[in-house]
Image: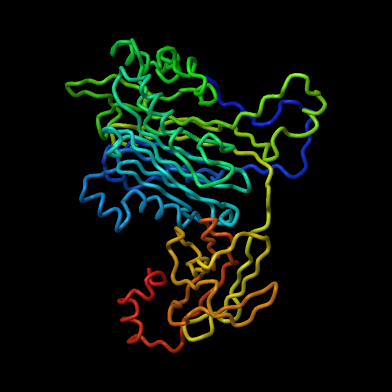
Amino acid sequence: MDGAESQEGIPNSASIQLPGQWETYRVHVVTWNIGTSEPPDNISSLLYLDSQVTADLYVIGLQEVNARLLQFVMDLVFEDSWSHLFMATLGPLGYVKVTSVRMQGLLLLVFSKQLHLPFIRDLQTTYTRTGIFGYWGNKGGVSARISFYGHTLCFLNCHLLAHMSYAAQRVDEFEYILDVQEFDTHDTPHVLDHDLLFWFGDLNFRIDDHGLLFLRSAITSNRFSLLWNKDQLLMMMKKEALLQEFKEGPLYFKPTYKFDRFSQNYDTSGKRRKPAWTDRILWRVKPRPKVEEGSKVEEVTRKPLREDLPLKVVLDTYTSDCTYGVSDHKPVIGTFSLEQLKKYETPLVQVCAEGDWSATGGPLVTYSILEPFSASTWDWIGLYKASFRSVSDYITYIWVKGIEVSSSDDVIQVYMNKDDIPVLKTDCVLCYYSSNARSIVGISPPFQVHESVMVTEEDLAPMIANGRDRNAAS
């Protein structure tokens, strides 16, 4: 097992110098089997919100979200309580949910700082059922892939087969998920094609052989290393070639399963299940192509072996937070520094608000294409509150192929419908959404929609009641 050390995706030659500027981004990954519970009141410590070092990306993988039929249907219509809590917590801090995917009890959420949105492209999600012969989504994997400043990242949240004796079958399930999941991209059609893969979830690997008394004694005395040689995942990583491509930080925290709820006591029920590190976070940098024998060393060290490298991952923290008790599992947290060269620094589209914006004025939008891309008649520009929480959180929108006020080769101007503009003073941004890229590819500087001087209190009440000003008034 590897410790908290750098795992590089570039040749190890110190002589390689590549053009451009290294940038460091921080990725905060959480995995938690929540045992069908409702969320706690506060998740600040789970997200390290008191830390002076802020995350650029938050990736949240939950297992056993309440998937009873009525609750599942309600969640599809109104959004589940866990997603709502994460959005309500991170939204005011400048984070936006860029994508999510739900398969029964499995939920994956990806958040980004708002400033990165124009550089997160080609979003896609997929899922694979493995539980109950593949017909019910109680087990399996959900994944999301993105291009982040030109580097391809994939996040795979799994809930694998339970019980002590099924270690090999868990590996088979994982390989099956990797085999069947596909994305509609020419360069990364499969999970393992991505430059960087984070694999996490309730992987359900247990600790073999050791008796309950020995396990609890080692845990109580913080001698976790006594248990590593019997951890099923670590044993499988020594035998399986595929798993050897993955890295994991040291297990310097207490096994995260199984606890009495709302306590830090391991299972005291009649079953007295053995503690285990069922909840894990691993990562894989895509291996470099092997150099054929006879190739010149100077040819290898002169340039990177792949055009889209380098990319380097450093594990900063790998731990669990035992203070949360809503589930019989404790959440596991991994924070990473992602070092890479930006492939692009210019958004595809520049969009801005022109003139005086109000419900009685002329809300004029100006946009221009800065970089060539595959535009669509389904592209649109949305008006959002400056602290919006997701792509679907718009106040109103206009199709980019709408009625143009003026147009040139460089700049296009369109009016939004003034009847849809907030009547109260509101800080807003405009976002250009690309249907082909499945993402926001341009975002305006913040601007203020002014309070409408023509609106009386009598006019305001029915507008709010009818939902016209639902975002401005919230």
Residue at point 17% right, 21% down? 270
For the question of whether residue 26 can be seen, the reply is: no
Q: Return the x and y of residue 176 as percentages of the image width and height.
A: 41, 30
Q: Quadrant of residue 163?
A: top left
Q: Quadrant of residue 261?
A: top left
Q: Relative to residue 385, is residue 201 depicted above or below?
A: above
Q: Relative to residue 122, is residue 225 depicted above or below?
A: above
Q: Return the x and y of residue 258 as percentages of the image width and height.
A: 29, 26
For the question of whether residue 312 can be seen, the reply is: yes
| Residue nearest the observer in this picture, 219 or 466 | 466
Q: Return the x and y of residue 456 as percentages of the image width and height.
A: 38, 88
Q: Relative to residue 35, is residue 289 depicted above or below?
A: above
Residue at point 42% right, 49% down? 100
Q: Return the x and y of residue 265 as percentages of the image width and height.
A: 28, 26
Left or right of 47 in this view: 336: right
In the displayed orientation, state which residue is furthest to the left. Answer: 270
| Residue nearest the observer in this picture, 129 or 23 | 129
Residue at point 58% right, 75% down? 365
